[in-house]
Amino acid sequence: MNLFGERWLSRNADYYADPNASPHDLLSDATEWLQYARHTTRLLADLINEEEPLDHRHLSISLEGIAAMTAMGIRCAALAQGRLQWMELEKTMTSQPGEAHPPETPPSGGSAASDQA
């Protein structure tokens, strides 16, 4: 919904992960975001089933919020997967003598996960 001349929520909502967060922490965050989206969806479904007239403006804003929470959960899960793959690569590289070692810091994640949502 265009409230202030732009879709603020969809343009400004993002997941910024702690660069030192473990894959476990990232997956916990993803679960939390997706649970928020799930419960908000259930609440909206209950409200829609009531007989009172529905404010379509508020409904569309709520649906955009659900989309943003889902996108953050997806991005968080994608970052966790990337960190797990990085850890596996790092483990493989350190177990083979004479091979070049990967850089010290894991990737912080690209925009591919947020583009999917």
Image (cartoon, rainbow, N blue to C red):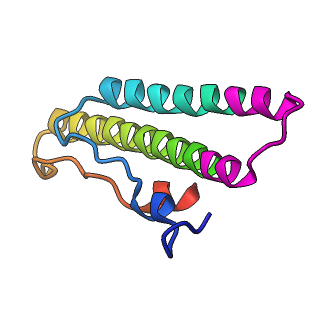
In which quarter of the view is residue 88 placed? top left
In which quarter of the view is residue 30 placed? top left
Residue at horizontal 20 percent and vertical 42 percent from the top: 93
User: Is 99 rendered above or below residue 44?
Assistant: below
Q: Looking at this rendering, what residue extends furthest in the right direction?
A: 51
x then y, percent, for residue 106: 21, 47
x then y, percent, for residue 108: 26, 51
In-image side of 89 versus 78 (left or right): left
**In front of the other: 90 or 19:** 19
In-image side of 111 versus 50 (left or right): left
Q: Does the magenta stretch include residue 84?
A: no
User: Is 44 rendered above or below residue 109?
Assistant: above
The secondary structure making up most of the magenta span is helix
Residue at horizontal 58 percent and vertical 69 percent from the top: 2
Residue at horizontal 46 percent and vertical 64 percent from the top: 8
In-image side of 61 versus 53 (left or right): left
The residue range painted magenta reads 43-62
Picture quarter with the N terminus: bottom right
x then y, percent, for residue 52: 84, 34
